[in-house]
């Protein structure tokens, strides 16, 4: 901005003054020198001249003041505001970047990256504005934009390292960033100082001009002292006073005194604009001080975080002396906190560690030399110390020749890793090998078959272990498993592998066998030792073991194949009565495949109408009438023909298909019984599996409701195995059915556990004596005694007694004399379809009449 003409800055006003001169001369020419008018005119001219001069000087000074205010505003205070804004933005940028290495939360780092992008754009905009302003004012340009790209690049690198938890690279890059930011800060400070100097110069210049104006006014006051003097003096003093106050405030703000109050901020003139600009500068200065306090607080928090780090940290300069360290560093090596001060040399620290006896195991002689030689080398090492601690050390160099190290105690981590590695291949309860290790060793043994090294796989399952768990609880069961594991270890050689593969199932790899005799001797030894009594606390436990054996290469050359065949042999051993062993043979796999085929075909038997029910009469011996019928399931396979229940019912129970088969049989039996012309009781068998997987009581009630059959005409036959565990759910279901009116009969009595407590726990309506006792009536005298005892027992409980398997008249006479109330068997009728029920009634009546 160029200064205007100091004599007549305003062209219209100058033209007016030039026109007044001729007018005054014309008047003087017509007036005589001694007249009063002349004096008045002369006085008027003088007064007018003084007024014009004062007006001209006032306008001139006003213009100077306006120009000075514009220059202070444009070149001074706006620059100060911009510089302050730039410095505040830079401080925020630095705070984010310099705190990033200590940040461990990636989400926070992502937010910081977004903030950094906005701050970078703000910095670039402010720097470009400053440079444009400097060029416009013909001032030496401050090369701010030249520094910013490098600064932004370093900031992005610091966040990148911090986001990937590379704290050491982040710290190194942050140090370079801080240096670059310091250069930029110095340039901003120099720019701000220049802006303050411009403001000070302009204020001083205005002050000088004000003094000249005062002198001019003094001359004019001699002419018009009583007219313009007081007003001129007042105006001049007010202007000078306001400018002086603003100058004073500006200097105090430059000295960081933000408590000063800026005057004239409400004045609607140029000085008011200056005052408002200074007030903005004051607000920015206050914000800057707040940011400085925040930075100091951040530094304090960083120091606190450093002291509370789980890692030990120590920074050295290029002279191998401590710059900073935290308390944890000394604790890791047993050193007092005050022994590691800034300036302590690395050699002194090593000497203190040697004196404490804390150094890497086995490196007493070379430790000091190696550590001093490779101090600045980038490295990551793990030291196992003489005090049984393990320290992970990460060392990173710094640009100034120093380095920083972090030390972390990873002792527990290493122990945990070793424990995890051990658990990955061992059972947590017994510490035996687990399934993973067993599979791995089996694969090794399979590979060794090429060297003619035979081996055997023994699959073990504990007998009656579930009874121990159910009666004594799982803690006792766990202790029992540990004792079993110890016995297994003592039964095998050191080259063999004992594994627990789940629950009460174990496996043994017998490696390097000569033949089958070696395996059988081990199997017999295992059965003998495992079957011996156990003492678990105060409890004496008796269990057994069943063993399935598969040998390689005799029974296969793949580990999975051997495991499958060992399981088949184990299943056959358990079928044979438990407490024994079986060696795999091909018939086992054939039987298994046949069962799988039956199970597959059985899934579609219901939908394809391959199943049907037949009914066998149950005769009331006292009334010599049919007391009811037992519903029996038959399966006519399209390819296999008629399959008896003994061949498919066990398979259905193993696969769970018995649930759907049982529901079908119950619905079909009740539906057909409801359609009979002569009402009769219908007996339906329920499998133990149905009590485990279904709400059997509701299923029975739904079947009766759907068919319309009266509940008292339905009798459910259950075996002793249903009540073996005496679960609350089973008893609740039976009581619910009994309350609904359904009869409950105990089937196959005498073939299972035959516990008399069953008869006390639940009031059965009938007891069915197994046909094996009836079949032996003629050959075994004890059978008659057993039947008589059961009949008497049932009679005492108010229960009916049904003898199954009656085929001859002599058998009928014996069971009747023994006290049985009902009989069932081929003597009366074979099972017949529902359509022949009426004919069975006639046949049975004739047979009973003949027998009587």
Image (cartoon, rainbow, N blue to C red):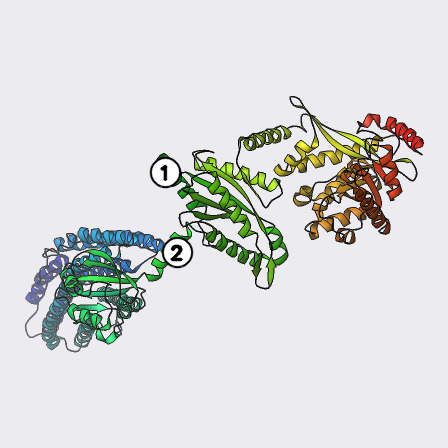
Residue nearest the observer in this picture, 545 or 499: 545
- The quadrant in which the C terminus is found is top right
Give the residue displayed 90% in from the left and 35% down from the top. Answer: 625
Q: Disc 2 and disc 1: Cα gap in Å?
A: 30 Å
Q: Where is residue 210 in the image (x, y as percent from the top left)?
A: 13, 71
The answer to which quarter of the image holds residue 69 is bottom left
Picture disc at residue 448: 1
Crowd tier of the residue under label 2, counting other residues whose Cα lies within 10 Å: few below 14, some 14–19, many 20 or above: few
Estimate how packed mark 1 is, as few (under 14), some (14 to 19) or many (20 or more) residues with alpha carbons within 10 Å: some
Residue 770: give x, y in percent of width and height: 77, 40
Of labels 2 and 1, earlier in sequence is: 2
The circle drawn on residue 676 is: none
Tag 2 secondary structure: helix
Q: Which of 247 and 695 is in front in this view?
A: 695
Question: In the structure shown, which secondary structural element does the residue marked by tag 1 occupy?
Answer: helix
* Pointer 2 residue: 419
Asked if residue 657 can be seen in this view, the reply is no
- Residue 96 location, quadrant: bottom left
Image-based side of 534 in relation to 100, left or right: right
């Amino acid at each position: 901005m160029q200064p205007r003409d100091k004599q007549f800055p305003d062209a219209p006003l100058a033209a007016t003054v030039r026109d007044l001169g001729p007018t005054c001369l014309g008047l003087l020419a017509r007036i005589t020198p001694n007249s009063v008018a002349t004096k008045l005119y002369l006085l008027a001219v003088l007064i007018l001249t003084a007024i014009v001069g004062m007006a001209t000087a006032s306008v001139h000074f006003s213009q100077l003041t306006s120009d000075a205010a514009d220059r202070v505003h444009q070149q001074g205070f706006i620059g100060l505001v911009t510089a302050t804004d730039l410095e505040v933005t830079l401080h925020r940028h630095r705070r984010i970047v310099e705190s990033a290495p200590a940040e461990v939360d990636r989400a926070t780092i992502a937010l910081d990256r977004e903030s950094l992008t906005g701050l970078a754009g703000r910095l670039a905009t402010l720097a470009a504005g400053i440079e444009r302003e400097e060029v416009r004012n013909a001032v030496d340009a401050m090369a701010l934009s030249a520094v910013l790209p490098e600064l932004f690049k370093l900031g992005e690198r610091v966040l990148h390292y911090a986001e990937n938890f590379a704290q050491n690279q982040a710290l190194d890059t942050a140090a370079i960033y801080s240096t670059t930011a310091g250069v930029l800060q110095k340039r901003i400070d120099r720019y701000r100082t220049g802006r303050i100097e411009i403001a000070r110069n302009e204020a001083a210049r205005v002050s000088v001009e004000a003094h000249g104006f005062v002198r001019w006014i003094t001359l004019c006051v001699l002419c018009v002292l009583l007219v313009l003097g007081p007003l001129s003096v007042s105006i001049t003093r007010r202007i000078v006073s306001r400018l002086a106050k603003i100058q004073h405030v500006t200097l105090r703000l430059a000295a960081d005194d933000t408590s000063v109050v800026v005057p004239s901020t409400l004045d609607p003139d140029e000085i008011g604009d200056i005052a408002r600009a200074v007030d903005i500068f004051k607000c920015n200065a206050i914000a800057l001080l707040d940011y400085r306090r925040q930075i100091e607080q951040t530094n304090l928090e960083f120091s606190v975080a450093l002291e509370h780090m789980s890692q030990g940290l120590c920074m050295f300069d290029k002279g191998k002396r401590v710059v900073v360290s935290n308390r944890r560093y000394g604790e890791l090596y047993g050193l007092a906190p005050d022994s590691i001060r800034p300036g302590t040399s690395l050699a002194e620290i090593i000497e203190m560690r040697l004196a404490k006896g804390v150094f890497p195991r086995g490196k007493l002689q070379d430790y000091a030399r190696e550590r001093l030689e490779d101090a600045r080398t980038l490295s990551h090492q793990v030291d196992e110390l003489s005090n049984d601690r393990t320290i992970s050390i990460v060392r990173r160099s710094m640009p100034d020749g120093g380095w920083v190290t972090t030390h972390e105690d990873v002792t527990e981590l290493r122990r945990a890793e070793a424990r995890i590695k051990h658990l990955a291949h061992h059972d947590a309860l017994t510490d035996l090998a687990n399934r993973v290790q067993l599979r791995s060793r089996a694969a090794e043994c399979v590979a060794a078959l090429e060297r003619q090294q035979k081996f055997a796989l023994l699959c073990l399952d504990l007998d009656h272990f579930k009874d121990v768990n159910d009666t004594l609880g799982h803690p006792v069961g766990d202790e029992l498993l540990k004792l079993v594991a110890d016995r297994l270890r003592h039964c095998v050689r050191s080259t063999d592998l004992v594994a627990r593969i789940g629950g009460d199932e174990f496996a043994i790899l017998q490696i390097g066998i000569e033949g089958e005799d070696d395996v059988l001797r081990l199997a017999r030894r295992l059965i003998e030792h495992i079957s011996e009594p156990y003492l678990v606390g105060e409890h004496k436990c008796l269990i057994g073991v069943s063993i399935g054996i598969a040998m390689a290469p005799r029974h296969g050359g793949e580990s999975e194949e051997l495991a499958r065949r060992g399981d088949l042999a184990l299943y056959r051993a358990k079928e044979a009565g438990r407490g024994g062993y079986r060696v795999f043979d091909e018939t086992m796999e054939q039987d298994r495949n046949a069962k799988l085929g039956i199970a597959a075909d059985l899934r579609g038997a219901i939908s394809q109408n391959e199943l049907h029910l037949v009914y066998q009469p149950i005769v009331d011996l006292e009334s010599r009438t049919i007391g009811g019928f037992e519903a029996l399931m038959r399966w006519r396979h399209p390819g296999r023909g008629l399959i008896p229940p003994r061949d498919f019912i066990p398979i259905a129970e193993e696969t769970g298909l018995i649930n759907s088969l049982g529901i079908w049989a119950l619905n079909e039996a009740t539906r057909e019984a409801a359609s009979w012309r002569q009402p009769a009781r219908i007996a339906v068998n329920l499998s133990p599996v149905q009590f485990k997987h279904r709400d059997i009581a509701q299923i029975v009630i739904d079947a009766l409701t759907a068919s319309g059959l009266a509940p008292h005409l339905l009798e459910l036959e259950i075996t002793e195995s249903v009540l073996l565990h005496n679960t609350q759910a089973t008893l609740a279901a039976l009581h619910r059915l009994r309350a609904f009116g359904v009869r409950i009969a105990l089937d196959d009595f005498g073939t299972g556990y035959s516990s008399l407590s069953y008869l006390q726990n639940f009031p059965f309506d009938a007891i069915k004596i197994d046909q094996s006792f009836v079949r032996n009536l003629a050959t075994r005298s004890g059978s008659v005694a057993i039947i008589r005892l059961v009949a008497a027992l049932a009679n005492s409980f108010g229960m009916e007694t049904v003898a199954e398997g009656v085929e001859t008249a002599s058998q009928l006479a014996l069971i009747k004399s023994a006290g049985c109330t009902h009989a069932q068997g081929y003597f009366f009728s074979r099972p017949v379809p529902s359509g022949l029920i009426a004919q069975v009634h006639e046949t049975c009546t004739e047979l009973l009449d003949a027998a009587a």
